Image (tube, helix red, strand yellow):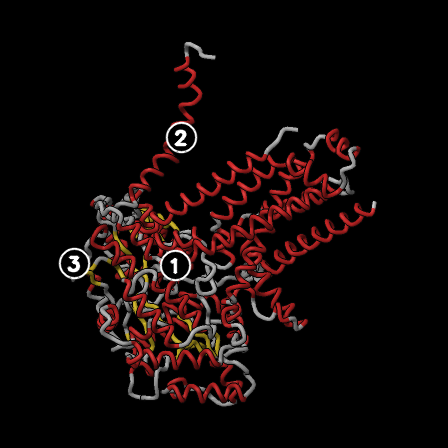
């Protein structure tokens, strides 16, 4: 009998622990669900009254597919394809890349099954990997003129359509800074690393204990932060390529390379004022958006793609958010301290292998429609909330982050450099950066892992 | 018994199954083996034969060997814990306690939740709930997220795996215990065997067939763990909890070294096949008839 009671007690205690864990897991897990049914979504209105685009009537009835790897614009793209079909008679089927699938893997598996999408939205590195083997040459398309400076060339040929410009830097929440300091905040007055540190110290004195949020995700650390060392070499993609070649060849000692130590100095500053300083690898991405919107922090290192997160966290399009550069040193004349990085990120590739001529023509018309038709121009900017790389597009983005990048691009205070790195750069060196962020390795070890990584390429 | 229409029977009953088996298992497997000898990158039209270069690549991939070692550690701990816990709980739940069916269902539930979902739930528990408890109570154990420290992240992985796998094994062990013949047990009691002696000399040998199955299932599942690894730690912090299966995927698709990844997958397969083969052979030998 005694045994039985003991058994009962143990078994029920265990079960209770298990069920309690399950329940709490569920309750908390879904508490932050952003889909509030009471929320009224603002409909973006598109003016379709004017349309001077010349449609090719011979293409009516053609059906093409578009693989979308930018989940946040899926709905907007579907609307775009509907608007395009109404006008041109060409059906564009928008296929999403499901969560957990990488766009490249998806495209490759579709190619291997003999059923590739006519158009696919990919990252620049993916396009470069696939271009000569699979893609249609787009060098002679008319829109290449409008996108000058934002085209990606592979051996002198253009194989992809730049869909948007994305920029990154230190996002600031103007209202929070002004409330804390009790004076107007002018971002252009922060010109050097010292200015920035002084500002952080004042914020700390004003009660914002740790004013910076820093994502621990490997893509943020390995791609968005670390790549500054290549991209600020001279602020061009060619320069970034050059420095990468030097590192790869072992000609450049990273310890001697200014940008490396400057980058780490800035990284250390951010690390020091990090809101999650106690446990930097435990930082939660969604919480960072909430912290910035609520004013627990004043800065967040991220890009303009973070807007949907901020909006979910309660930020409004009327609020003042913007970007500060990633300050590398105290030289006011160094472009890196004055300019924001902004480059084309997502590219559309047209299949040149399986698609019929009719389908290719329809796809090219769709791309031209995005660039030249009044409706396409509006939808790219307003429905998709993208920053257009096309000079002829007169529309301005609505959300403050994209608008800030857009203004920097227009005013010439953005530098367009994107380093083309191997596909596993973000994951392998992201891990090395995580180790450094957690304080479990020093600069030497980090630089050594960077050099080792490149030596293997 | 041989029948004349042997061929016809074979065609009717075995051929469809054989065809499917060959089409989705054997042929892709052989094709995969073939790919390890080529430089195919997943995209290109041409596949050049490059001999054993990919295997040389595996040899020089230190990360693969360290994740294989980590997988071994993980497998040993998980297999032991799962089987001991499941055996103990199944033993308790066949003693005829009140509500034992309820408890059986309760323990089995975690197994019904998919690995990915489970991983996300526990990620939340480790990095939010535990940290909040730590803040509230000042306990050192929960001060930082378990997932941001390599050893604790590994412990977290084991904890969740054991929690998930035990339920299923409990079910198998419960079935085993129910199948124990009352006569034998009674005879043992009359002969004066009690408690531990009964367990060691009567119950364990008779339970060997359940143990064979459970060991095999836990071994193969633990070796091939991917979903939980992905959603709970994603290999982090800084790549210290990347298990072999995950490393293979990363190698093939993130690093785009298809051939090397494929060769690593083959090596992993051989390791798992050998170990589970040996395990089944040895535990089968221990099985006895009542």
Helix, strand or loop status at disc 2 = helix
In percent of width and height, residue B245 lies at: 43, 50
Residue contact between numbered discs 2 and 3, judged by CB atoms under 8 Å:
no
Q: Earlier in the sequence, mark 1 or mark 2?
A: 2
- The residue beneath circle 3 is A140
Residue B51 in the image, given as x and y percentages of width and height: 24, 46
Do circles 2 and 3 both sit on a common chain?
no
Find residue B20 and name its label. Answer: 2
Q: CA distance from mark 3 to mark 1?
A: 45 Å
Q: Where does the C terminus of chain B fall, quadrant-wise?
A: top right
Residues at discs 1 and 2 both on one chain: yes
The picture quadrant where one finds residue B210 is top right
Graded by Cα atoms within 10 Å as few (under 14), some (14 to 19) or many (20 or more), the crowding at tag 2 reads few
Q: Nearer the viewer, mark 2 or mark 3?
A: 2
Kindly report the distance in space between the C-alpha atoms of the residues bearing marks 2 and 3: 48 Å
Q: Are marks 3 and 1 in contact (CB under 8 Å)?
A: no
Please report the residue visible at 38 percent of the width from the left and 73 percent of the height from the top.
A445
What is the count of numbered marks? 3
Q: Residue furthest right?
A: A1
């Amino acid at each position: 009998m005694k045994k039985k009671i003991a058994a009962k007690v143990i078994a029920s205690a265990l079960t209770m622990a298990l069920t309690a864990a399950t329940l709490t897991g569920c309750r908390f897990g879904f508490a932050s669900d952003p889909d509030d049914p009471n929320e009224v979504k603002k409909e973006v209105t598109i003016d379709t009254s004017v349309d001077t685009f010349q449609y090719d009537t011979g293409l009516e009835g053609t059906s093409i597919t578009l693989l979308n790897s930018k989940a946040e614009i899926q709905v907007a793209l579907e609307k775009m394809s509907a608007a395009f079909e109404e006008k041109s008679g060409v059906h564009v089927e928008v296929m999403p890349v499901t969560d957990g699938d990488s766009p490249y893997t998806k495209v490759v598996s579709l190619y291997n099954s003999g059923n590739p999408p006519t158009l696919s939205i990919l990252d620049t590195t993916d396009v470069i990997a696939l271009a000569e083997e699979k893609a249609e040459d787009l060098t002679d398309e008319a829109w290449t003129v409008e996108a000058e400076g934002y085209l990606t060339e592979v051996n002198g040929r253009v194989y992809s359509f730049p869909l948007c410009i994305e920029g990154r830097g230190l996002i600031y929440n103007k209202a929070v800074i002004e409330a804390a300091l009790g004076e107007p905040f002018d971002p252009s007055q922060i010109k050097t690393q010292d200015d920035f540190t002084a500002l952080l110290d004042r914020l700390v004195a004003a009660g914002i204990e740790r004013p910076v949020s820093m994502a621990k995700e490997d893509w943020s650390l390995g791609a968005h932060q670390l790549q500054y060392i290549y991209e600020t070499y001279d602020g061009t993609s060619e320069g970034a390529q050059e420095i990468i070649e030097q590192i790869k060849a072992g000609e450049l000692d990273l310890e001697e390379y200014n940008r490396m130590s400057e980058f780490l100095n800035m990284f250390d500053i951010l690390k020091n004022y990090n809101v999650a300083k106690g446990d930097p690898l435990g930082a939660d991405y969604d919480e960072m958006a909430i912290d910035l919107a609520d004013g627990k922090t004043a800065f967040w290192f991220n890009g303009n793609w973070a807007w949907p997160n901020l909006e979910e966290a309660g930020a409004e399009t009327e609020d003042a958010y913007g970007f500060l550069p990633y300050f590398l040193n105290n030289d006011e004349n160094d472009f890196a301290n004055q300019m924001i990085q902004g480059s084309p990120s997502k590219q559309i590739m047209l299949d040149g292998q399986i698609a019929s001529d009719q389908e290719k023509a329809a796809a090219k018309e769709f791309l031209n429609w995005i660039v030249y038709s009044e409706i396409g121009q509006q939808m790219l900017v307003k429905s998709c909330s993208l920053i257009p790389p096309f000079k002829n597009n007169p529309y301005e983005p609505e959300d403050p982050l994209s608008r800030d990048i857009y203004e920097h691009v227009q005013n010439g205070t953005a530098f367009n450099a994107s380093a083309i790195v191997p596909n596993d750069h973000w994951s392998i060196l992201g891990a090395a950066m995580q180790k450094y962020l957690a304080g479990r390795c020093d600069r030497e070890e980090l630089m050594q892992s960077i050099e080792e990584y490149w030596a293997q390429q | 018994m041989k029948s004349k229409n042997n061929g016809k029977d074979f065609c009717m009953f075995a051929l469809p199954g054989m065809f499917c088996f060959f089409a989705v298992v054997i042929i892709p497997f052989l094709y995969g083996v073939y790919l390890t000898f080529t430089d195919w990158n997943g995209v290109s039209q041409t596949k050049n034969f490059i001999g054993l270069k990919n295997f040389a690549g595996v040899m020089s991939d230190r990360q693969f060997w360290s994740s294989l070692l980590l997988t071994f550690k993980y497998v040993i701990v998980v297999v032991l814990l799962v089987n001991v816990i499941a055996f103990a709980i199944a033993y308790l739940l066949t003693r005829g306690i009140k509500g034992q069916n309820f408890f059986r269902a309760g323990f089995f539930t975690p197994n019904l939740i998919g690995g990915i979902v489970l991983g996300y739930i526990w990620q939340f528990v480790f990095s939010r709930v535990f940290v909040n408890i730590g803040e509230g109570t000042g306990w050192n154990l929960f001060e930082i997220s378990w997932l941001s420290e390599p050893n604790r992240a590994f412990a977290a992985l084991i904890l969740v795996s054991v929690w998930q796998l035990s339920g299923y094994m409990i079910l198998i062990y419960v079935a085993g215990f129910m199948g124990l013949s009352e006569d034998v047990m009674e005879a043992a009691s009359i002969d004066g065997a009690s408690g531990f002696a009964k367990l060691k000399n009567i119950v364990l040998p008779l339970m060997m067939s359940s143990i064979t199955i459970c060991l095999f299932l836990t071994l193969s599942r633990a070796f091939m763990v991917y979903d939980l690894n992905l959603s709970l730690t994603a290999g982090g912090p800084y790549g210290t909890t990347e298990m072999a299966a995950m490393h293979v995927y990363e190698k093939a698709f993130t690093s785009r070294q298809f051939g090397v990844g494929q060769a690593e997958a083959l090596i992993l397969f051989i390791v798992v096949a050998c170990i589970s083969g040996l395990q089944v052979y040895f535990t089968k030998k221990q099985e006895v008839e009542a």
